[in-house]
Image: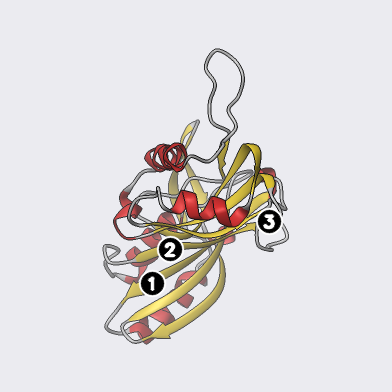
């Protein structure tokens, strides 16, 4: 028999129409799916018990992802494959379980997020040159909303471009951006700044979250 665990972590793909579901609605949707699945999820004690399901980090609205992570605590040990089968059957279209495993890292160890950004262009080679010109600027100042209101930040020190690829009809970039403390970087800010610099439309740009990573930039498991 397969080993069973009282706590499991799930990696979920959120694609197609599901990318238009807000983070709060995504959480509610998954919680409903967990209840429908019949899995023995653990609930807290007290007057208002709540399900012990923790979501790693919010995904900006309109982005696809193959790297959404949530952790579920169960009232009794559960076999990973059985949990995957039960929960997948209850998830809506556009959400797919990609991986189920015993947690390795603590939630607080999440530090970076990897994104794949596809920018359509009839002249992707020229767009590639404009991307490098964009990075060679002394600074890229943008207005960013924070809990204390709007403030001006420089995006350049926060852009870690891991890969660049020119394909037919598009420039594809891989970014590693920080999340949580001390600074979270929304890839939409970079896309808006670059497309404005290059004089191209941002409407058809596709952003996909591909992986969560630790401070050492290894996969968050």
Q: Secondary structure at mark 2?
A: strand
- First of labels 3, 2 by sequence position: 2
Please give the name of the residue rendered at 48% of the width and 39% of the height, measured from the top-left corner.
38
Q: How many marks?
A: 3
The answer to whether the residue labelled 3 contacts the one labelled 2, judged by CB atoms less than 8 Å apart, is no
Lower sequence index among marks 1 and 2 = 1
Does residue 52 appear to the left or right of 7 in the view shown?
Answer: left
Decide: marks 1, 2 in contact (CB < 8 A)? yes
SS at circle 3:
strand
- Around disc 2, counting alpha carbons within 10 Å, would you say few (fewer than 14), some (14 to 19), or many (20 or more)? many
Q: Nearer the viewer, mark 1 or mark 2?
A: 2
- On residue 118, the disc is 1
Residue highlighted by disc 3 = 214
Q: Judge whether residue 68 can be spotted in this image.
A: no
| Relative to 139, 110 lies left or right | right
Instruction: Residue at the far top: name it.
Output: 47
Label whose residue precedes the other's in the sequence (3 or 1): 1
Q: CA distance from mark 3 to mark 2?
A: 19 Å
Task: Return the mark for residue 91.
Answer: none
Label 2 sits on residue: 208
């Amino acid at each position: 028999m397969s080993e069973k665990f009282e706590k499991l972590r799930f990696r979920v793909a959120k694609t197609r129409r599901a990318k238009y579901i807000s983070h709060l609605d995504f959480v509610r949707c998954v919680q409903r799916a967990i209840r429908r699945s019949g899995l023995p999820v653990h609930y807290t004690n007290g007057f208002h018990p709540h399900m012990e399901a923790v979501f790693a980090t919010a995904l900006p609205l309109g982005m696809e992802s193959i790297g959404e992570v949530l952790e579920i605590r169960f009232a009794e040990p559960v076999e990973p494959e059985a949990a995957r089968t039960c929960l997948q059957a209850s998830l809506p279209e556009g959400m797919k379980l990609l991986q189920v495993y015993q947690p390795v890292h603590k939630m607080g160890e999440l530090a970076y997020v990897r994104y794949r950004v596809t920018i359509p262009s009839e002249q992707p080679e020229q767009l590639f040159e404009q991307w490098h010109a964009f990075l060679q600027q002394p600074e890229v100042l943008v207005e960013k909303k924070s809990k204390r209101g709007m403030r001006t930040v420089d995006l350049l020190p926060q852009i870690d471009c891991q890969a660049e690829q020119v394909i037919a009809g598009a420039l594809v970039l891989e970014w590693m951006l920080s999340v949580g403390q001390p600074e979270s970087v929304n890839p939409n800010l970079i896309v808006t700044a670059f497309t404005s610099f290059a004089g191209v439309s941002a409407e058809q740009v596709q952003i996909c979250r591909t992986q969560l990573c630790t401070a050492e930039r290894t996969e968050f498991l």
